[in-house]
Amino acid sequence: MAPHMGRRLRKGAGTTAVAALAVAALSASQAPGVVHASTPTDQAASDVTPPPTPDAPASGNSPYYTDLPPLASPTPPNASTGTLPIGDQQGIPATVLDAYKKAEAALATDRPNCHLPWQLLGGIGKVESGHANGGRVDANGTTLTPILGPVLNGAGFANITDTDGGAYDGDKVHDRAVGPMQFIPSTWATSGRDGNGDGVKDPNNVYDAALAAGFYLCGNGRDVAVKADLDKAILSYNQSQEYLTTVITWFDFYRRGTHEVPDGTGSLPSRRSDQTSPKQPPVTPKAPPSQKPSPKPTPTPPAPPVKPTVPPTKPDGGGTPTPTVPRATTFEGVGAKELTAFAGGAFGGQPTARVKDASGKAMAKVSVKFEIVGDTDTRFTGGATTVTVATAADGTAAAPALKAGEKTGTFTVRATVTEAGLSAVEWKATVVARQADDLVRSDTKELTAAPSGEFANPVSVKATYKGAVASGVAASATMIVTPAAGADPKAAPKVNDKGPYFKDAKGNPIRELTDLKTDANGVLVLPKMYADTQTGTFLLRLTTEGGATLTLELKVAAAS
């Protein structure tokens, strides 16, 4: 294994530092699966009980992927398409990437002194499971099929007697590493977390597993911004110098740049630490060099699972055609093409798209990316602007609910799939200002004042829209001239320059207020009003966004 990794590290230019790191670490490592007797075992987070077996860290020292990233710096996505080809090394499946980032955010609050970046979880997730087998997860982040390590029965690996009754790994005799972050059941029992808020701690769910891995790495008060603590954290997951080097290499690679790819289309590693090459037979403590460290009969890696978006391949050398994988040929919107909401409210519908193959049959488990495009503060549930959803059995994928922000205007919701030649589906979305269709005064007290005096009773009104409280609605209050008989009722009233008035910040008389807004209960209370020397009956008109109006009489008369 060491010669293989050495060859990979020497490829490319400008890689001396990374290559030196790998070579130095590998020179001190033993064969895969062999644990240094002097390597201390680390427990999980300081508030969590450590695994019951002293020599079994988080993964039980299960096998892991040893493929290394290209040493050249990651390249940005294609300028015209915004993506790189399926299978590119720096692409991380959308749901898996989201889980890593959400775990980082949670730990920034719960373990702020740990300084754990999501790229470290990405490095471990890549090495442990190839990011959940290339992102083969459902919309909730649960793996479509179980990801299990080999039986930990001491045959080339640790010997861990069953601790979960087979609940997680299906084995009632020995334990096996489980899920995208490869926790052994005994560790999950003490370190498991609920990362997606569904009330369940499931090692097969990438949100739960990523958060649990983060807490585990931050155990014992470690600060992974410190190199020594970073090394201890990674070794607490798998006690192998080769493992440490591989994880750090991916960690460094992801810190230099990455991007999301649709679920199910991530690149799959091929070589694991329990596989050997003819030139480098394995070494185990109690077996001759020719004995393999794994009970597997052949070192040939299993074929990667078929991805639904990969086009059919040509017949192989034996003349047997590879099974044809259906390709998406139709991508269409379902339902209304326009969406509208009041500022701060919910949109009436959800952007929904359908995927079909050439025969018109609905295609399930195709990743559809929804994104909000334009100058808006509207967001999907959870605050995201981009989400990836897998199609259901009927071929449809619905975006999470949209929550309108306070910024009014029009923007676009765009849905795309990775199939070549399929146009994006777009929805026009509009956020309109909050509105009221009715204004009612809160009391019936007469509004009176003496010349050059003050109005004793404040004006308080309540706004509603279709009978419901209308909060945050823009309004204006204007002293108006009494309309002449026969005047057009739709004509804008003239502002009165005599009679009652408000005061501005400097105490000067003003007779029009335009920056008013109803409170959370739909209530609007006007500032104090004053009378000049004019007597008589005057009109005050209140108007809201949405067209609600209310005209009040103000009387100024000398005391009798």
Image (cartoon, rainbow, N blue to C red):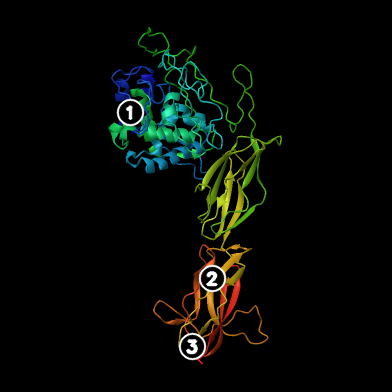
Q: Single out the residue that lies furthest toward the top.
A: 288
Q: Secondary structure at mark 2?
A: strand
- Vertically, is 388 above or below 26? below
Q: Is residue 515 left or right of residue 318?
A: left
| Residue 402: x %, y % from top left | 56, 50
* Residue bearing mark 3: 450
> Number of labelled discs?
3
| Residue 369: x %, y % from top left | 56, 42
Residue 19's disc number: 1
Residue type, label 3 = Ala
Q: Single out the residue that lies furthest toward the front.
A: 560
Task: Assess disc 2: are there few (<14), some (14-19) or many (≥20) residues with their C-alpha within 10 Å of its C-alpha.
Answer: many
Q: Toward the viewer: 552 or 65? A: 552
| Residue 48: x %, y % from top left | 37, 31
Q: Single out the residue that lies furthest toward the right.
A: 359
Residue type, label 2 = Ala
Quadrant location of the N terminus in the rendered image? top left
| Residue 537: x %, y % from top left | 56, 87
Q: Toward the viewer: 28 or 430? A: 430
Mark 2 or 3, which is nearer the eye? 3
Do the numbered discs 1 and 3 sit on residues whose CB atoms are within 8 Å? no
Tell me, yes or no, if residue 12 can be seen here: no
Residue type, label 1 = Ala
Name the residue rendered at 57%, 50% in the picture: 413
Q: Is residue 28 left or right of residue 491?
A: left
Task: Assess disc 3: are there few (<14), some (14-19) or many (≥20) residues with their C-alpha within 10 Å of its C-alpha.
Answer: some
* Residue bearing mark 2: 475
Q: Toward the viewer: 481 or 463? A: 463
